[in-house]
Image: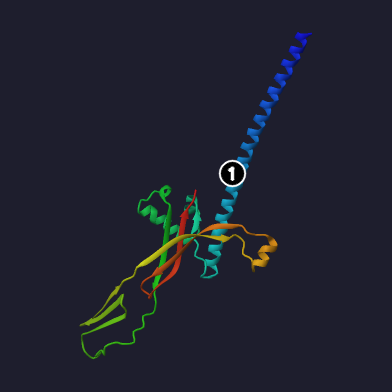
Amino acid sequence: MLNMLTLVSTFFNKINSYLILGLIIGLISSIGYIKYQNGMINGLDTEIVRLNNNNIQYLSIMNDYGIEKRALQLKLSDLNTSNDKLIQEINNSAKRLKVAQNSLKSAAIIKTSIDTILVTKVEPIDTLACDFTATLEPNSLTTIIIERKSDSLYCKPNIENQVSLLNYNKKEYRNQRKNWLSRLIHWDWKKDEIDRYELENTNNLIKNTDVRVIKIVE
């Protein structure tokens, strides 16, 4: 009788051990699966942020809004497949300068033009004289000397400019709402971290006609 009880006790102890082991394995598997799912969700959310950011920036460029200054978030593969001519030029510059594409972290390309130069005070020029020299100085960073010598006309521009490009992060709501009440009704408080930039020229005659600031992402 004692042997029977011992066998039964041993049997139930083993069952309990297997149940506990099964519960531990199940718990570990559940935790692993939850982490995997969270990783997948976070990855998809990051991709949504990237695509939404790029879409807003390109819409701003195409419609000439002039208010969005977002850094494009591009993958290395985008440099080779983009139809954006300025992005293609960045890619071509990397090749010309022999910069390995997989080493790129960020890049920028800026197209500029010189605005109309208006000079209100010019020294009188004797156009009947064979030779003359005129100096135009629309601002302290721009001097243009025009000379006529015999049958030749010379233009000697000295245009200085310093460009400041500031890249910074800013938390912004993902979805734009008309007002706080609309946001409250929809309970939409999701914010994304946006890469923005500010660009400044010291010479006010220099105008930025097109700009691309890109950040390389994995």
For label 1, the SS is helix
Q: Position of residue 147 (x, y in %)?
A: 24, 81
Which residue lies at the image location 63% right of the left edge and 59% below the top edge? 189
- Relative vertical location of residue 36 with respect to residue 62 in this rendering, above or below: above
211 displayed left or right of 2 = left
Residue 200 image point, x, y percent: 40, 69
- Rendered image coloring scheme: rainbow
Q: How many marks?
A: 1
- Residue 117: horizontal and vertical position, in percent? 36, 80
- Image quadrant holding the N terminus, namely top right
Q: Is residue 11 left or right of residue 141?
A: right
* Identity of the residue furthest to the right in this view: 1
Question: Would you say residue 151 is visible in this rendering?
Answer: no
- Name the residue located 60 percent from the left edge and 59 percent from the top edge: 174
Q: Which residue is mark 1?
A: 39
**Residue 65 located left or right of residue 121:** right
Instruction: Report the front residue among 119 and 23.
Output: 23
Give residue 20's position: percent from left, percent from top: 68, 26
Whether residue 162 is visible to the viewer of this picture, yes or no, is: yes
Judge the density around disc 1: few (<14), some (14-19), many (≥20) Cα neighbours within 10 Å: few
Amino acid of disc 1: Gly
Res. 187 image quadrant: bottom right
Q: Nearer the viewer, residue 169 or 200?
A: 169
User: Where 209 sits versus 127, above or below?
Assistant: above
Q: Is residue 8 left or right of residue 192?
A: right
Q: Residue at x 61, y 64 (%)?
A: 176
In this orientation, which residue lies closer to the viewer: 63 or 199? Answer: 199
Vertical order, 115 against 59 (above or below): below
